[in-house]
């Protein structure tokens, strides 16, 4: 990691999800180099990138989607795209041969992602949440994302992210409107 390794030695969150603690334990047990970044509470991609001091293209934007394959089958997908892009819903629909793809409701997203909106990780800790990442995310030498908290972020390499999270890597990002 270009910025060095930083291990979290403080207490882990004990909130309803403890997703932050789960993530830190996973990174530590895998021996992944990472850096924790503390900042003012923020969940919007552009704003938190400014706080962390990097371009939005180096951030992971994580969106929980509802994918209706047919009348009886609904899947939930965690789509991860670069922070300066948006999720291409048509690409996700084609990927799953679905009838419909849309954003998940906030309650379902929080339950499956085990994090509140604005803090969703690019990892899935729920078997009911399929993880799909754009290839431009895993190719990043520096990948920033909120660490299941509004006031703390992580920096890891895209290759370490891919190795640890094991996402399905597919082209699902489209340029954001200007």
Image: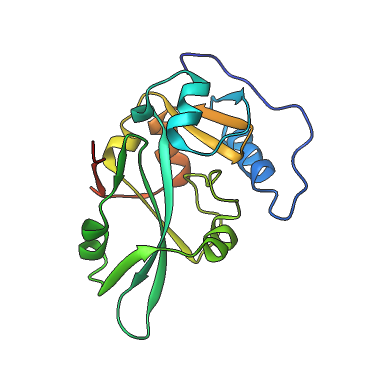
Q: Which of 118 and 16 is in front in this view?
A: 118
Q: Nearer the viewer, residue 24 or 67?
A: 67
Q: Residue visible at 48% across and 41% down?
A: 164
**Where 151 sits versus 100, above or below?**
above
Q: Residue visible at 41% across and 41% down?
A: 61
**Where 125 sits versus 104, above or below?**
above
Q: Residue visible at 64% across and 37% down?
A: 24
Residue 29 in the image: state x and y as whole percent: 62, 37
Q: Residue furthest bottom?
A: 72
Q: Nearer the viewer, residue 129 or 90?
A: 90
Residue 20 in the image: state x and y as whole percent: 65, 42
Residue 14 in the image: state x and y as whole percent: 78, 47
Q: How many labels does the image show?
A: 0
Give the left or right position of residue 5, taking residue 74 as reference. Answer: right
Give the left or right position of residue 177, taking residue 145 as reference. Answer: left
Q: Which of 167 and 148 is in front in this view?
A: 148
**Where 131 sits versus 96, above or below?**
above
Q: Residue furthest front?
A: 178
**Where 25 sits versus 125, above or below?**
above
Q: Residue visible at 58% across and 19% down?
A: 5
Q: Quadrant of residue 6?
A: top right
Residue 95 in the image: state x and y as whole percent: 23, 62
Q: Which residue lies furthest to the top in this view?
A: 3
């Amino acid at each position: 990691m270009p910025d060095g390794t930083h291990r979290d030695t403080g207490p882990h969150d004990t909130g309803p999800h403890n997703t932050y603690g789960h993530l830190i334990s996973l990174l530590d047990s895998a021996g992944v180099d990472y850096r924790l970044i503390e900042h003012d509470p923020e969940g919007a991609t552009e704003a938190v990138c400014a706080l962390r001091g990097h371009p939005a293209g180096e951030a992971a934007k994580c969106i929980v989607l509802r994918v209706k394959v047919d009348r009886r089958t609904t899947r939930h997908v965690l789509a991860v795209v670069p922070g300066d892009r948006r999720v291409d819903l048509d690409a996700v629909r084609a990927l799953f041969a679905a009838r419909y793809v849309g954003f998940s409701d906030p309650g379902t997203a929080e339950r499956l992602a085990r994090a509140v909106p604005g803090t969703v990780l690019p990892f899935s800790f729920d078997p009911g949440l399929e993880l799909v990442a754009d290839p431009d995310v895993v190719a990043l030498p520096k990948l920033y994302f909120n660490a299941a908290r509004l006031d703390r972020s992580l920096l890891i390499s895209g290759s370490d992210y891919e190795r640890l999270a094991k996402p399905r890597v597919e082209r699902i990002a489209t340029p954001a409107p200007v």
